[in-house]
């Protein structure tokens, strides 16, 4: 009995194979509909599996790309942060080794710029945070904040006190401990991102199996599709029925009826084409009757459409020209070979271009004219090559140039669709002059405020915190700026003195300004009981970010004692 079971299974398999061969040859007793429906069912099953595997493959690929990109971006950010930390340490050493404040200034500027870049780099790193590095990154971010605040204080001491004060501030175990912990954090993050990259590679290996399954299913679908084609080629009953129905419709006068199976090259195809010739002969009789009337109507419609198109084209051309020439800036458009497509009148006036330079001229011709008129003294060939390079790379640019006649031109360059280039140029000479004058005035005012004998104090009117004190005010209060700035009166003075100061601030809010001096006696935590004369001015409104109080303070304690 055990031997009979395998023999029976082999016989069943042989019979199934014979039926499959007869099905492929069209020699079995199945109807065409049964053949088509059976193959379609198998094809639908394979297609369903193929769809499932495709979705799985896409999911794996998407996960892999995300993991790999996240790991790569995070590793780059960690490397950039490490380099910025090193650069900040080097700038700090420049401050330590400076002999005076003037030498300290250049290193202080570089250190503050690097501080800003370091903060931005940490923000970029936070965009790639995941479950594996969230805790480590939170600790790392806190140490970065400590590191940045420490360097800011170092700069302040170096500029406001002396390089020696900066060296004293930086030479301590706390600073070195933070630096060592930062190095440890960077190494830990690098290990996390290396592990993330390895996990992404492992996921890519898994995706290869999905590709193999997709290939196998695709091959199966291809085989079933081929079998379906063989069966359909052997079926003619449905085709004959379609052609018979088409012939009946034509006989009833439906000359627009479609004739099926015209693409076949066998007898059914030839029969279909013969029926089509019959249909076309009947249709031509009706078409000839309508042709004469239709031709005249079509000609009139075409002429009307042409006139409308020309009107629209001229209107658009005029609108574009008016828009370009009404711009307050100079504008020039170039194609991919640096040939002028269009320019407005402001651009021509900006560089005194003659009428011979029009659309179709080259950028090189414009630069040669500027060389002759003294408005360009660079290398024409190199400049044109640089512009062609930016056009090829579709790389936008923004920069300023100084002309020999004293003007300053701001240039904005952007790529256009189709490979062209547009440059908008603006004369910013007066703007730059006003900026330089404003900078000189700011330095002048700062020098005056720092050297007046009267104490000057500024507060943020929204939260009553100190935002500025001059040297005279530091001396009166008996505290440094670092101890005062950012704090309220209650954090610096006794409760009684703080209440008095806040009451005067509220009076100023109600009165808008207080130019007459008010004499008060307050307890100074560093200098004891002092008699002061204060005038207050309110700057800005309640809804403005620049809303501040400015207080001018004079210590009259010694004068009062002498008068007594």
Image (cartoon, helix red, strand yellow):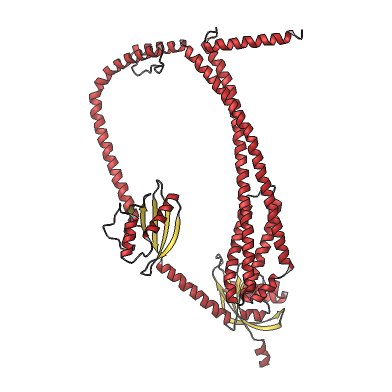
Vertical placement of residue 452 versus 303, above or below? below
Q: Quadrant of the N terminus?
A: top right
Q: Position of residue 64 (x, y in %)?
A: 62, 40
Q: Is residue 117 above or below residue 50?
A: below
Residue 403 visible in image: yes
Q: Is residue 552 left or right of residue 339?
A: right
| Closer-to-camera residue (260/361) | 361
Q: Residue at x 69, y 60 (%)?
A: 143
Which residue is drawn at the image coordinates 67% and 89% (left, top)?
Answer: 558
Going by the image, does 18 lie left or right of 269?
right
Residue 241 falls in image quadrant: top left
User: Which of the pair 63/208 is nearer the observer?
Assistant: 208
Depth check: 167 or 527 in front? 167
In the rendered image, the quadrant that contains the C terminus is bottom right
Q: Report x, y in % for residue 297.
A: 25, 29
Q: Quadrant of residue 560?
A: bottom right
Residue 490: in sight, yes or no? no
The x, y position of residue 513, in whole percent, is 56, 75
Q: Position of residue 413 (x, y in %)?
A: 42, 55
The quarter of the picture where residue 506 lies is: bottom right
Name the foreground residue: 15 vs 139: 15
């Amino acid at each position: 009995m055990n031997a009979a079971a395998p023999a029976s299974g082999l016989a069943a398999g042989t019979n199934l194979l014979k039926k499959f061969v007869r099905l492929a040859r069209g020699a079995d007793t199945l109807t065409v509909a049964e053949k088509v429906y059976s193959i379609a069912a198998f094809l639908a099953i394979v297609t369903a599996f193929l769809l499932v595997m495709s979705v799985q493959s896409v999911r794996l690929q998407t996960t892999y790309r995300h993991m790999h990109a996240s790991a790569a971006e995070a590793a780059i950010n960690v490397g950039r942060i490490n380099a910025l930390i090193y650069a900040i340490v080097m700038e700090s050493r420049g401050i330590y080794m400076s002999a005076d404040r003037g030498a300290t200034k250049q290193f202080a500027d570089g250190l503050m710029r690097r501080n800003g870049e370091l903060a931005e780099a940490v923000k970029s790193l936070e965009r790639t945070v995941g479950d594996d590095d969230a805790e480590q990154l939170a600790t790392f971010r806190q140490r970065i904040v400590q590191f940045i605040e420490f360097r800011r204080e170092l700069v302040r001491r170096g500029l406001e006190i002396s390089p020696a004060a900066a060296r004293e501030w930086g030479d301590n175990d706390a600073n070195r401990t933070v630096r060592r912990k930062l190095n440890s954090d960077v190494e830990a993050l690098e290990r996390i991102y290396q592990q993330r990259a390895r996990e992404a590679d492992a996921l890519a290996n898994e995706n290869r199996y999905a590709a193999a399954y997709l290939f196998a299913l695709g091959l199966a679908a291809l085989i079933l599709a081929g079998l379906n084609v063989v069966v359909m080629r052997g079926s003619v009953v449905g085709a004959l029925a379609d052609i018979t129905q088409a012939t009946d419709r034509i006989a009833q006068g439906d000359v627009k009826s479609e004739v099926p199976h015209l693409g076949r090259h066998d007898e059914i195809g030839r029969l279909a084409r013969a029926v089509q010739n019959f249909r076309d002969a009947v249709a031509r009789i009706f078409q000839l009757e309508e042709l004469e009337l239709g031709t005249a109507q079509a000609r009139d419609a075409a002429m009307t459409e042409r006139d409308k198109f020309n009107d629209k084209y001229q209107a658009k051309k005029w609108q574009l020209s008016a828009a370009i020439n009404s711009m307050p800036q100079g504008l020039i458009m170039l194609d991919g070979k640096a040939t002028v497509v269009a320019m407005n009148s402001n651009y021509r006036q900006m560089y005194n271009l003659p009428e011979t330079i029009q659309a179709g001229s080259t950028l090189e011709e414009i630069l040669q004219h500027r060389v002759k008129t003294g408005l360009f003294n660079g290398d024409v060939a190199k400049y044109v090559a640089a512009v062609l390079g930016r056009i090829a790379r579709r790389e936008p640019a923004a920069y300023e140039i100084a002309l020999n006649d004293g003007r300053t031109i701001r240039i904005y360059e952007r790529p256009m669709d189709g490979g062209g280039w547009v440059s908008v140029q603006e004369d910013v000479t007066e703007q730059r002059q006003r900026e330089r004058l404003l900078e000189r005035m700011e330095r002048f005012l700062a020098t005056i405020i720092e050297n007046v004998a009267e104490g000057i104090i500024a507060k943020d009117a929204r939260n009553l915190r100190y935002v500025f004190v001059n040297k005279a005010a530091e001396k009166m209060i008996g505290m440094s700026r670092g101890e005062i700035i950012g704090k309220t009166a209650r954090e610096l003075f006794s409760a009684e003195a703080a209440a008095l100061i806040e009451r005067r601030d509220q009076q100023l809010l109600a009165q808008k300004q207080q130019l007459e001096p008010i004499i008060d006696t307050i307890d100074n935590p560093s200098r004891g009981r002092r008699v002061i004369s204060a005038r207050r001015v309110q700057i800005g409104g309640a809804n403005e970010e620049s809303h501040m109080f400015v207080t001018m303070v004079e210590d009259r304690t010694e004068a009062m004692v002498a008068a007594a």
